[in-house]
Image (cartoon, rainbow, N blue to C red):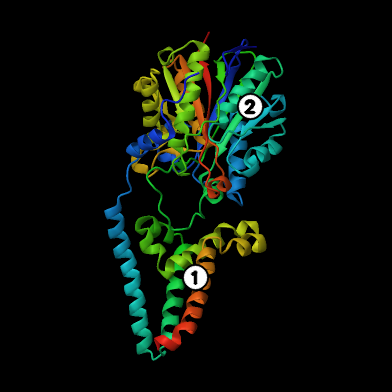
Amino acid sequence: MSRAGQQTFVYDRPPVIAAHASVAGPKEAQGPLAPWFDALLEDDLLGQKSWELAEMEMVRRCVMDALNQARMPAESVQALLGGDLNNQIIASSFAARALGMPFLGQYGACSTFVQALAVASALISGGFLDSAACVASSHFCTAERQFRFPLELGTQRPPQASWTATACGCALLKGEGEGLRITSGTLGRVIDLNITDANHMGAAMAPAVFDTLAAHFSDMGRRAEDYDLIATGDLGWIGRDLLLELCDAAGVSLPPDRLIDCGASLFYREQDAHAGGSGCGCVASVSCGWLMKRLERGELNRLLLVGSGAMLSPTSSQQGQSVPGIACAVSIERGR
Amino acid sequence: MSRQPFTPDRYRELVASHTPPSRQLRGYLRAFWVGGTICVLGQALTLWAEKLNLGEITAPMFTTSALIFLGTTLTGIGVYDRIGKYAGAGSAIPVTGFANSVAAPAIEFQREGAVMGVGARLFTLAGPVLAYGIASSVLVGIAYWLARGWVL
């Protein structure tokens, strides 16, 4: 286990992504990435009694799908690292109850999945774990009722609002074997440029993504051109433009053709998702469903996945606080 | 470690320049015709009530009750949120919107039970309107009582 610079883990024994699974909800199933997801939901209640139980069931199914792909029984997985947007991350912890794995709860808002990958990779590289499942989920209906308004209320959203994805992604990491490898992870600082509009999460998070990107490049002695693709999540269309402006002004090279955003990729613009997708499940499902498959197909060799989160709560917003952002990055490479 | 290239003030300007504006004129027109239609419906109900000889006091109550029934029903069958998305304030301001703001949490929080769910959350949105509406009517009433000697 070694470190680079101030914020970056370099994994001496890079863990292998043994399997990865994704689940996407009905609106996401109408989007451009629908053919890539492993499972599409027709009923976003999944036959459950509440939205929260539905999200829990989505997490459970997604983890089971990854286990089945890797032909691993649940008992053989030494840790489940997961999180979601619900208060006290109940979707993940209730799914962990059903799965019976040792559980390490994660929270980094929409960056949760990447945070889980970075932590699990460190534990595997350090020899503390042989296997770990990383999972993150979000559900439009649980997020709406917790952060905004009841679903049936007739309100309008501003153009800068994002749309919480109903989606889940799970990556199963192992110390040994064949597959994609997670080679480094960069932790993020909490950055706040005093954006007070709680709807404008892309604007709140873009400076944090810039900070983590710059730290990663500096720590690793790399540039954007060293990666085939840099995938951020979930800045949305507006936040992606802001990130390009920030990099340009700071003199950090970031070619637009190497930058995609998971939130801006999940929906068509005509789908009325406003600024794009968001939620822990967005970057999790897009990376597990689409980006990792593109790496496996050989379309990409080296990917930098940068999850971003808006660290607000309804309480902090009501008390007039600004929206701090965070971003966590991992590099994922094909072959060795 | 790279420093942020913009100060918060400069960044706010950049954000504003990248954020598409709400389509205000379209919003005004939609709010006007939907809100206006609801009001015309209310007026029609009042005229009908007068035809039925319900009386000066009962006729407006008949209208209000009918519109609340309509707003609640449209919320229950999942239509009012779509109207609200289209019309904004046009459907939020009339009494049908008030009905929607009570019925929507009633549906949403029934899973948390009758007491701490529906009972406690029923007025989460309408509560401020009720609190300040009733408080201001009391204040206006006191002002009227004090001033009636001069005014009338």
Query: Relative to A284, does residue B113 appear above or below in the rendering?
Result: below
Q: Tag 2, which chain? A: A
Residue A8 point in image, percent of width and height: 57, 17
Image point 51% across, 12% down: which residue? A220
Image point 60% across, 60% down: which residue? B110
Tell me the quarter of the image containing the N terminus of chain A: top right
Residue B141 point in image, percent of width and height: 49, 80
Residue A118 point in image, percent of width and height: 59, 22
Q: Nearer the viewer, mark 2 or mark 1?
A: 1
Badge 1 amino acid: Gly
Q: Which residue is mark 1?
A: B133
Image point 44% across, 81% down: which residue? B62
How many C-alpha atoms fall within 10 Å of the one at disc 2: few (<14), some, or many (≥20)? many
How many C-alpha atoms fall within 10 Å of the one at disc 1: few (<14), some, or many (≥20)? few
Q: Nearer the viewer, residue A168 or A253?
A: A253
CA gap, disc 2 and disc 1: 53 Å
Q: Label 2's element?
A: strand
Badge 2 amino acid: Ala
Relative horizontal placement of residue B124, taking residue A213 as reference (left or right): right
Q: Nearer the viewer, residue A145 or B142?
A: B142
Q: Which residue is mark 2?
A: A133
Query: Relative to A141, does residue A237 appear above or below in the rendering?
Result: above
Relative horizontal placement of residue A168, taking residue A255 as reference (left or right): right
Q: Residue furthest front?
A: B150
**How many numbered tags mark residues here?**
2
Q: Label 1's element?
A: helix
Query: Relative to B22, does residue B121 appear above or below in the rendering?
Result: below
Q: Tag 1, which chain? A: B
